[in-house]
Image (spheres, rainbow, N blue to C red):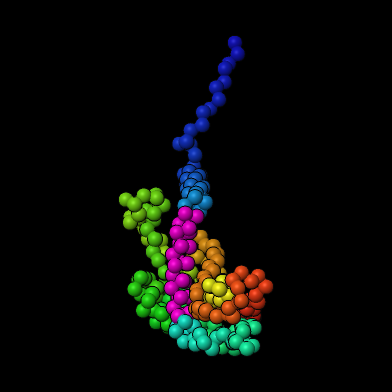
Amino acid sequence: MNKIHLKKTFKLSKIKPINLIAIFIILILIGIYLIFGYIKDKIMPSLFKYGSLEAKKFSSIIINDAIDKYITDTLDVEKLFLITNDNGEIKSIDFNTALINKHLTKATKSIQQSLKYIEKGDIQKVEYQADLLESYDEKALKNGVIYYLNSGFIFNNPIFANFGAQIPIKISLTGDVVSSISTEVTNYGINNALIKVYVNIKITEQVILPYYDKEIKLETKVPIALKLINGTVPNYYGNLNATTPSLTLPNA
């Protein structure tokens, strides 16, 4: 009669304690990896989207204040335009390049320095701290944090928006502040031109969240001057051959 041999069943109790601890640690590490992967791929992009809006809003305050202080409030618009007349007829319109570059350089430098100070938490060195402190927490700014976002925001529900751990949002200027001048010329009445002058500011920032960061680009267009140019009234309305003023822009 043949003997039947039964295989020994695997018993967890026979595993050495040291091996159980190792298995337990590995499972925990795998769980942590999966959780962080989910947070990075699913949750953090939503938080970053909101954080980038706050970063743009914050930076816009500094940009607008710098333009107001160094350009809008101090620039003599009448000296900005150089108009060439010939017997009362406007031949050309140019810019006072040296004047606009002087003001634009000061504003650009101020924006760059202020954003660097914010990054380091040196709020007392920022020229526009009064305006910033109206909307932001001074204690947070001294830690380099522009905004604290409650983690309950991820549920996309107003009930939970004010609950959960606070997630700090920081910004870092990753490149130079690029500034330039642009214009818009439109017809105004009969043979008149309305010239609008804008300052264009472009910055690249890194929005920093815990375990997540990404660059954003901010482009701001701020009007600084408005000029109405009165041309020569033609003999009859609808003269398609009437000469229109030319506008030459400086290299900024």
Q: Which residue is farthest top?
A: 1
Decide: is 211 above or below 159.
below
Is 172 part of what is drawn in magenta? no
Q: Looking at the rendering, in which quadrant would you find the N terminus?
A: top right
Q: Which residue is farthest right?
A: 241
Q: Estimate the x, y position of residue 89 in percent, counting from the top left.
A: 62, 84
Q: Is residue 6 left or right of residue 142?
A: right
Part of the protein shown in magenta:
45-68
Marks counted in the figure total 0
Decide: is 251 above or below 147.
below
Q: Looking at the rendering, in which quadrant would you find the C terminus?
A: bottom right
Q: Residue at x 39, y 82 (%)?
A: 124
| Residue nearer the viewer, 108 or 149 | 108
Is 49 part of what is drawn in magenta? yes
- For the stretch drawn in magenta, the main secondary structure is helix
> Which quadrant holds residue 169?
bottom left
Q: Is residue 93 visible?
A: yes
Q: Residue at x 51, y 31 (%)?
A: 10
Q: Estimate the x, y position of residue 107 in percent, counting from the top left.
A: 51, 82
Q: Estimate the x, y position of residue 79 in percent, counting from the top left.
A: 54, 89
Q: Is residue 32 visible?
A: no
| Residue nearer the viewer, 33 or 72 | 72
Q: Residue at x 44, y 84 (%)?
A: 73
| Residue nearer the viewer, 201 or 79 | 79
Q: Which residue is farthest front?
A: 235
Q: Estimate the x, y position of residue 154 in percent, counting from the top left.
A: 41, 52
> Which quadrant holds residue 92?
bottom right
| Residue nearer the viewer, 110 or 25 | 110
Q: Residue at x 35, y 70 (%)?
A: 135
